[in-house]
Image: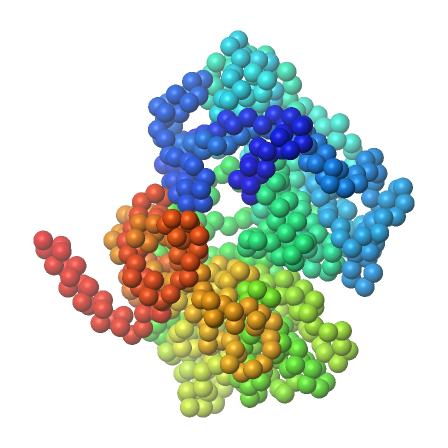
């Protein structure tokens, strides 16, 4: 988005005749620690492949580019030469005047009272000067977007909150700074520094931000925000350490202006799940000018075509639910978010505020047994369980790009899943029930889902909802509970998106009922070869494959509890069962399972073990590997699509065309070869993939496979033409013929590409490898 904004602002002056103050200065991102440098190297390797020039430079080179900087405490930096500065007010004026020339009407000094909605569709806007009829409304009200959203007849929840943001302006230096002096980001010092009329403009993101306007816009007018030198002092000290010569410089003023932040540091973009035609673009987290051009483009595409040209799920308003719109939550969360913008973020970090909001009934039981928690869509999920003999504090504080401290813990959980039986609480999954009085449910679902759902009662189908382009709007499993009733299980963060998609495409029919039952069921995943023994002992029913085949669902009693939905699947490719337990029985069933399971070596496990298992089995997850621009044919899921059955379903035409023309990317599994797990940087996600030395795509997720004793990454391979850079068809042959490397922070590691999971060849292959490796060590 920033790259697009940069190119857009560069040409604005030519197009409109309005000066925008665009000057290409370049940016220098400083690193005071090795970890910060690793983080910059990771960013640098990604920028290079998307066509944004950047390089890692030495402290000496930093001093050459910006002679006033003190560089003695630096270990390196990243230089992005094409970055620029503009005057934001002038850019806004230029965009507005270009819009007017194209027929846009702009009413200034006009307040919006509320947006008018009829039957879930925008119909107009009520202003203090009268009504305007419209089918689309875009809420770009910045820090007031939250309130404006709630003022409609049908409220729209937009989770953001303002904080005071301080920056100082100085008079020009004795030798005024050149206009093309690079902008400096010193994240470890929490400040940024740029040239301003020959002097300095410098602000930052302090550790103790001041949230503002929690009670809304009647609180006070913007002009009244006060200078607060005591509050700014740590940032000022940081600035003087970085540029000692400023000591004698006269400061003109300390500016205090509100900036808006969101619960996850990403801006909010897209259409409301409740009101059609109501779009949002707000919550820019202090990067409004740099992301504005690109974000505006995506929003325009979304409104005109119905979807943006890139996958921007991470920015979609529907990633949030109503649960993120509590003012108390937002106030506490932005106090954490603002400093986080400049904090060093290592893989797998978690927010600390706004926690324990949605929990499973087993939360306290699991917590007492050493569970360490992560949060997804407000739901607490166990990462792993710390054994009683481990030092808890050390584990919480170890944050690294290398081998993490939980490595051995997760290894023992994975081993237990493979050899005995483990329990993972997976209650956070989104769960819907779709029922009808006649055959309506089946008819509607057959059109909305790509796989055939007309299966015998009790069968489970892996499928997904596709959009017109054949891309996955959702990835799920559906169990047919009865002739007219279906149970759908989707990823946790799809609760709002999925509901909105179904509501949008299901006919208005009083005989058709869609119910969100996420909160009604606690889900326990029993993974491992002994799961079958535990369950048959608890239910007095045979659970072997001949009585309970794979992908089967049956209501059973477990212990004293009736009506437990037992499904023979584990989301990992390992044997076992999912138990969907009515919430009031959760504790009883868990206790029974743990007590009977003791003799089979049962233990708790968490999502890190699950990730390791699913990635080594080449199971792709929506939101990580799959998105709205990924089709089933691009990720080896042809078998989950009813193309041959002559039935119409959404996305079918696009898939038929793709089947004829071939795919332009293919999900591939990579096994790292020359990577030392103990000493080398780990892959996490987003690492560039090289094929025969040429960039071919990025990884989407990765995990250490304890079975292969290697790192496994999943990612899409593209076939970019060497001459034109255009995408060409990717065949299995193309993938198998390549030599691959994965770039981790600028270091390339060799990798073997696979299109199918490595099966029971595991053990045989490993012994052979060990012999070869011991030969090497011998040499």
Q: Position of residue 280 (x, y in %)?
A: 69, 49
The residue nearer to you, when weighing 415 against 562, is: 415
Name which residue lies at 67% across and 64% down. Answer: 500
Name which residue lies at 36% across and 67% down. Answer: 732
Q: Is residue 203 above or below residue 49?
A: above
The residue nearer to you, when weighing 436 against 387, is: 436
The residue nearer to you, when weighing 70 against 609, is: 70
Q: Position of residue 419 (x, y in %)?
A: 33, 74
Q: Where, by quadrant of the figure, is residue 620 drawn?
A: bottom left
Q: Is residue 60 above or below residue 431?
A: above
Q: Residue furthest front?
A: 723
Q: Position of residue 647 (x, y in %)?
A: 58, 81
- The quarter in which the N terminus is drawn is top right
Residue 614 in sight in this render: yes
Q: Left or right? Give the position of 592 relative to 42.
A: right
Q: Residue furthest top?
A: 174
Q: Position of residue 656 (x, y in %)?
A: 52, 72
Name which residue lies at 48% across and 29% down. Answer: 26
Residue 361 in sight in this render: no
Name which residue lies at 76% across and 50% down. Answer: 137
Q: Is residue 313 above or below residue 433?
A: above
Q: Residue furthest right?
A: 130
Q: Left or right? Give the position of 119 relative to 60.
A: right
Q: How many marks?
A: 0
Q: How is the image coloured?
A: rainbow
């Amino acid at each position: 988005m920033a790259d697009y904004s940069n190119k857009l602002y560069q040409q604005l002056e030519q197009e409109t005749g309005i000066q925008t103050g665009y000057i290409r200065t370049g940016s220098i991102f400083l690193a005071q620690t090795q970890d910060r440098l690793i983080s910059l190297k990771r960013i640098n390797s990604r920028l290079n492949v998307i066509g944004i020039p950047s390089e890692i430079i030495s402290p000496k080179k930093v001093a050459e580019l910006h002679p006033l900087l003190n560089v003695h405490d630096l270990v390196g930096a990243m230089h992005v030469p094409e970055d620029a500065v503009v005057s934001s007010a002038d850019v806004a004026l230029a965009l507005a005047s270009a819009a007017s020339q194209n027929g846009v009407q702009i009413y200034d000094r006009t307040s919006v009272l509320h947006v008018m909605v009829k039957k879930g569709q925008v119909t107009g806007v009520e202003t203090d000067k009268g009504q305007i009829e419209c089918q689309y409304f875009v809420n770009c009200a910045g820090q007031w977007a939250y309130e404006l959203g709630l003022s409609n007849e049908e409220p729209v929840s937009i989770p953001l909150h303002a904080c005071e943001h301080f920056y100082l302006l100085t008079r020009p230096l004795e030798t005024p700074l050149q206009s093309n002096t690079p902008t400096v980001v010193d994240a470890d010092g929490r400040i940024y520094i740029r040239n301003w009329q020959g002097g300095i403009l410098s602000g930052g993101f302090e550790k103790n931000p001041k949230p503002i306007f929690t009670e809304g816009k009647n609180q006070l007018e913007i002009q009244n925000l006060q200078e607060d030198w005591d509050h700014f002092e740590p940032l000022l000290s940081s600035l003087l350490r970085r540029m000692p010569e400023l000591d004698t410089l006269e400061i003109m003023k300390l500016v205090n202006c509100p900036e808006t932040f969101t619960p996850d540091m990403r801006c909010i973009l897209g259409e409301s799940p409740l009101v059609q035609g109501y779009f949002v673009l707000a919550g820019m987290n202090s990067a409004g000018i740099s992301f504005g051009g690109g974000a505006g483009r995506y929003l325009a595409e979304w409104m005109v075509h119905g979807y943006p040209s890139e996958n921007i799920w991470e920015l979609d308003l529907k990633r949030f639910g109503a649960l993120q719109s509590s003012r108390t939550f937002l106030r506490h969360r932005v106090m954490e978010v603002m400093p986080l913008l400049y904090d060093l973020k290592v893989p797998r970090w978690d927010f600390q505020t706004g926690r324990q909001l949605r929990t499973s009934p087993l939360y306290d039981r699991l917590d007492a047994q050493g569970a360490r928690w992560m949060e997804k869509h407000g739901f607490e999920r166990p990462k792993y369980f710390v054994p009683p003999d481990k030092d808890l504090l050390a584990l919480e504080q170890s944050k690294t790009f290398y081998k993490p401290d939980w490595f051995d813990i997760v290894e023992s959980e994975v081993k237990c899943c493979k050899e005995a039986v483990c329990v993972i609480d997976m209650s956070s999954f989104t769960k819907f029930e779709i029922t009808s009085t006649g055959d309506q449910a089946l008819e509607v679902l057959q059109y909305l889902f790509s796989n055939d759902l007309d299966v015998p009662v009790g069968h489970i189908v892996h499928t997904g909802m596709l959009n017109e382009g054949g891309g996955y709007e959702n990835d799920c499993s559906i169990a047919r509970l009865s002739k007219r009733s279906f149970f759908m299980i989707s990823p946790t963060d799809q609760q709002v998106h999925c509901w909105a998609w179904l509501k949008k495409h299901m006919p208005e029919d009083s005989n058709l009922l869609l119910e969100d039952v996420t909160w009604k069921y606690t889900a326990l995943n029993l993974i491992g070869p002994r799961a079958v023994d535990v369950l048959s002992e608890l239910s007095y029913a045979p659970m072997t494959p001949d009585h309970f085949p794979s992908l089967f669902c049956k209501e059973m009693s477990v212990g004293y509890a009736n009506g437990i939905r037992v499904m023979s699947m584990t989301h990992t490719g390992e044997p076992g069962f999912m138990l969907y337990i009515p919430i009031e029985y959760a504790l009883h069933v868990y206790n029974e399972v743990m007590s009977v399971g003791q003799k089979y070596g049962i233990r708790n496990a968490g999502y890190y073990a699950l990730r390791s298992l699913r990635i080594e089995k080449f199971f792709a997850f929506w939101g990580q590997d799959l998105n709205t621009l990924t089709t089933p044919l691009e990720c080896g899921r042809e078998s989950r699509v009813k193309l041959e059955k002559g039935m119409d379903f959404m996305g079918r035409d696009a898939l038929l065309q793709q089947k004829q023309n071939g795919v332009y990317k293919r999900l591939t599994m990579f096994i790292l070869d020359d990577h030392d797990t103990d000493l080398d940087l780990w892959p996490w996600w987003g690492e560039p993939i090289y094929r025969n030395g040429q960039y071919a795509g990025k990884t989407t997720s990765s995990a250490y496979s304890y079975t292969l004793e290697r790192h496994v990454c999943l990612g899409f391979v593209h076939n970019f033409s060497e001459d034109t850079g255009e995408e060409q068809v990717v065949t299995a042959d193309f993938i198998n013929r390549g030599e691959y490397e994965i770039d981790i922070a600028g270091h390339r590691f060799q990798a073997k590409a696979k299109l199918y999971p490595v099966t029971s060849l595991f053990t045989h292959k490993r012994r052979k490898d060990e012999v070869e490796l011991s030969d090497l060590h011998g040499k």
